[in-house]
Each structure stands twice: as structure tokens, then as C-alpha cells.
Amino acid sequence: MTRIFERPSVTADIVVFTTQNNELKVLLIKRGSTPFKDHWALPGGFINKGESIEQAAKRELQEETGVKNVYLEQLYTFGKPKRDPRGRIITVSYYALIKSKGVKLEAREDAAEAKWFPAYKLPELAFDHQEIIEYAKQRLQWKLEYTTVGFQLLPNEFTLTELQKIYEIILNKKFDKRNFRKKINSLDLLKYAGKMTRKVAHRPAKLYTLKKRIGEIVEIL
Amino acid sequence: MTRIFERPSVTADIVVFTTQNNELKVLLIKRGSTPFKDHWALPGGFINKGESIEQAAKRELQEETGVKNVYLEQLYTFGKPKRDPRGRIITVSYYALIKSKGVKLEAREDAAEAKWFPAYKLPELAFDHQEIIEYAKQRLQWKLEYTTVGFQLLPNEFTLTELQKIYEIILNKKFDKRNFRKKINSLDLLKYAGKMTRKVAHRPAKLYTLKKRIGEIVEIL
DNA sequence: CCAAAAGTGTTAGTGATACACCCATGT
DNA sequence: ACATGGGTGTATCACTAACACTTTTGG
């Protein structure tokens, strides 16, 4: 019995999340060429020789955002035969969390437009990227409840209200302030890091930093 | 800037779990050729033209075990450049759960030996398959606690003791009989399906079937 | 003194755990 | 009658959820 194997192309595509203005945002790139010309698509690209898939994802991410040392996690591998009209392309998807501070979308070599979109109000997307983002949002929601990844979206020092906002934005529901703080407190995750110095027209909040190693599995909510 | 892309080969490898003699078992195949000749390895193989990755996994699985309609879930994609000495090979791993009844390892075309091994006493494995199996075991443990996948390892009708054994085997700990039954009961998952007919030297157990759709997310333990 | 967010405790209800004896059957 | 696994209830403890007022600061 003879079989016809294929040598598919493999890409790494990344769902880059951040928070801005109390909204969860996703980074998209406007395609400059067919197919799906002028549609928005996930950043990503082919894997270079000698490079692991994760390295490829990191490289693409840095090319797009200039950000290094990002939380990056593999999501799922999409490989239906017809998902890209150009031929057999298998996409290993990742999602990344970056802090809103310190990201400036770089002017890119190829002058493609890059923009943040609200994760719950996305434009029409190229390929099956809609599906990939849905998958990423679900994974992110899950991870938020059972691990400490949420802290990846915050600066090193943050207030409890900021932390709560992250949870509310991503899980799309409100939490009771007292219960939320009680829970976080009971987990012994945070270290007091001084008072907020920025002048605000109300009582200044306390600042905290994360004690434990990130990514650790801890049931948060 | 020019980059050198690759057209890696892509395989689907499957960690096939079943339970036998109150043990969690994994199906392995003895390699007949280099590299890793005579080492044990996961079943799997290249993806055919026009076939999705999941279809490939299902096909391989059926070739190995003769079993159809199996619970199959994608695990993770492994793609370090040097993981296979023959060249750039990316492996999309899956895990499968099959009921111990009805599996007979088929005499294979290529006469390779296939055998069940206890998941916690594995032989030396080819490639990075050790790592893949570890990953699969963790995922399985997790899924068992938060979904109804565990029922995939049982026949259509089963006793509560059999169900509890599945949990004990995979999570590697004992549960209190009364509390376990109370919990399962409170989830309203099971339908009474008559008494055990097989003659046993003790009070015959009641049989149950699963009510809800499988794979559904339900916090079990 | 007003506006705005920070910070803080108690109660009731729900779910988790620990624990021991009788039941139905085959030999 | 005895051996074997099947089947059941209660009490305690821990966690969750609901709920409102005082504090600190800037303007």
C-alpha cells in the first residue's frame, strides 16, 4: 500500500492580548496581499530553519510589537486541508499576554498596518482566525481562574482594584470587592510594595507585587 | 531580508489509554528500524494528502487497534528542530481513551509488535515520546476532574464502583465510597440501567449509563 | 465640604470531608 | 454461616456569596 505524504508548510500564529481602557484587546495585522487582501489577520509566519515553533512565535511577536519576555503559551494546531486556499498550511497557534505599558506597535518593514481591536468586537478576519481567537479567549478565561497568568497583564506593581479589573474584563463579569480581596489574600500571592505615589483625587491605593513564580497552578476563583 | 523556510514533515502521534486490571495502560509499538530500533514508541504516522490532522490520528489509531468512534483530543505540538535525528519533523500529539472491552491489537501489516504498558511503568522510549506521554497523563488527570471524559473508559453500562476505580487509577489516590457516590449523584449525570446480571458472590451492583453528552465540562471532583 | 475610589467584617448557605454499619448474594 | 463487595446518613468544617459603611485624598 502506497500513501501520498505531504510536506505542508507550518506557520506559528499568535493571539496577542493586552488590556487598554478597561477592555481586552487583540493585535491584528491588515493583509496586504491575496488571499484575504485587506482583511485583518493574526500576526505570525513561517518557521525558520533550525528554529523551534515557539522560537518562531517569539520572533514574530517581537517583530510586530518590539516586546520581549512575554508570556507565551501554545494553544492548538489547526490543520484542515482547505483552511488556506494557497495550499496545505498547518498553523500552530499561540497566545501571548503583554502589559499595556511599553508596547508601541512598530513601524514595520513591510508597512503593513497593525492595530489593537477589542476582543469582543472583532472585524471580519482572514482564514480561520476567528476560530483561533475564540479558542484563545476561552483558554485565557480558563487560565485566569486556575493559574496566576492574569498578573502578566499588569505592571510589576499594581493595585488590587487593577487586578480585579483584569478579572472582570476577561471573564466579563463583576466581582464583589470584599470577596475578591479576601480570596486573593487567602492565597498568599502578594507582597505589599508601598503606597501609590501618583496623586489621585481620592484615597491612594496600596501597591502589591506577585510573590510566587508566575504560571503556577493556583485555583484563584 | 531573506529567510530560509522549511517544509517539515508533520506526523500525528497518539497516546492511547485504556484500563486493564485496575491499571492505566498506554499502547506502544516496537520500532523495527533505525533510529531507535527496538525501542518502544507511540503509534502514529504522517498525514496523508487531503486529510486533516485529526483524521490522520483516527486512521492511525484504527490501523493499530481496530477501534472506531474513540474519544480523541489534541494535546500539544512538538517541534524542536533536533527531536528526530532524521530531519525536521513536527509532531501533533493526541490522546485517545478506549474501553478495555473490544480492543484486540490487530496483527499488523508490517508485523511490528504492539503492546499495552502500565502508564506508570514505561520502558525506554524513542524520540521525545516520554515527554509526550507525561503531558498526556497530566491532561488526562485534569480532564477527569473537570469533565466527563472518564466515562469513555467504561462500557455503556457500569457500576459506581467501576467508575470510582477509574478515578482512583488515573488520579492515583483513594476516594471515600460514600462521598464519591454523593458527588456523582449530585451532578445528575447517571441513569439507572438495571441490576448487574452477572452472578457474583456478593450483592449484585446496580448498573448506570451516562445521561449527558460526553466531553461536557462539568466539575466532577 | 464634596467627589471619588480605597479599604474593611459578619452572616447564612452550600459544599467537602470524615467516618461505620447493614445488605444481598454465592458457596 | 461466612465471605465478599454493594449500598447508605450524619456531623463538622471550610469556602462562597451577599451585603454597606468609613477612610483618605484632591479639588
Image: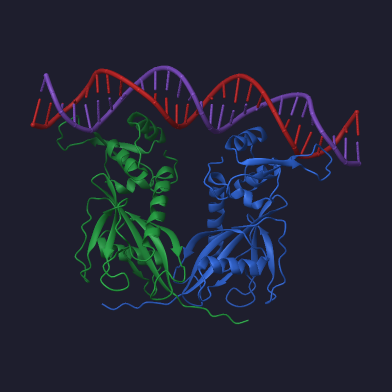
Chain colours: A green, B blue, C purple, D red
Describe residue A143's horizontal placement relative to residue B20 as left or right: left
Q: Is residue B97 above or below residue B105?
A: above
Where's the C terminus of chain B, which quadrant? top right
Extreme-front residue of the structure? A124
Specify the quadrant of the image occupied by residue C7. Answer: top left
Residue D19 spot, x, y in % from top left: 35, 22
Say whether residue B59 is left or right of residue A195. Answer: right
Question: In which image quadrant can residue C6 be found?
Answer: top left
- Residue at (62% x, 36% y) in the render: B185
Residue A6 seen from this side: yes
At horizontal 35% and vertical 39% (from top left) the residue drawn is A173
The x and y percentages for residue D23 are 22, 22
Can the viewer see residue B43? Answer: no
Viewer-proximal residue, A87 or B116? A87
When the figure is inspected, residue A166 is found, relative to residue D23, above or below; the finding is below
Which x, y percent locates residue B157? Answer: 70, 47
Q: For residue A33, what is the image quadrant?
A: bottom left
* Residue A172 vs residue B179, the one in the foreground: A172
Q: Which image quarter holds the N terminus of chain B?
A: bottom left
In the image, is residue B28 above or below residue A203?
below
Total marks shown come to 0
Residue B9 spot, x, y in % from top left: 48, 75
Residue at 37% from the left image edge and 59% from the top image edge:
A130
Left or right: B202 in relation to B97: right
Residue at 72% across, 63% down? B104
Give the vertical position of A110 relative to B184 (above or below): below
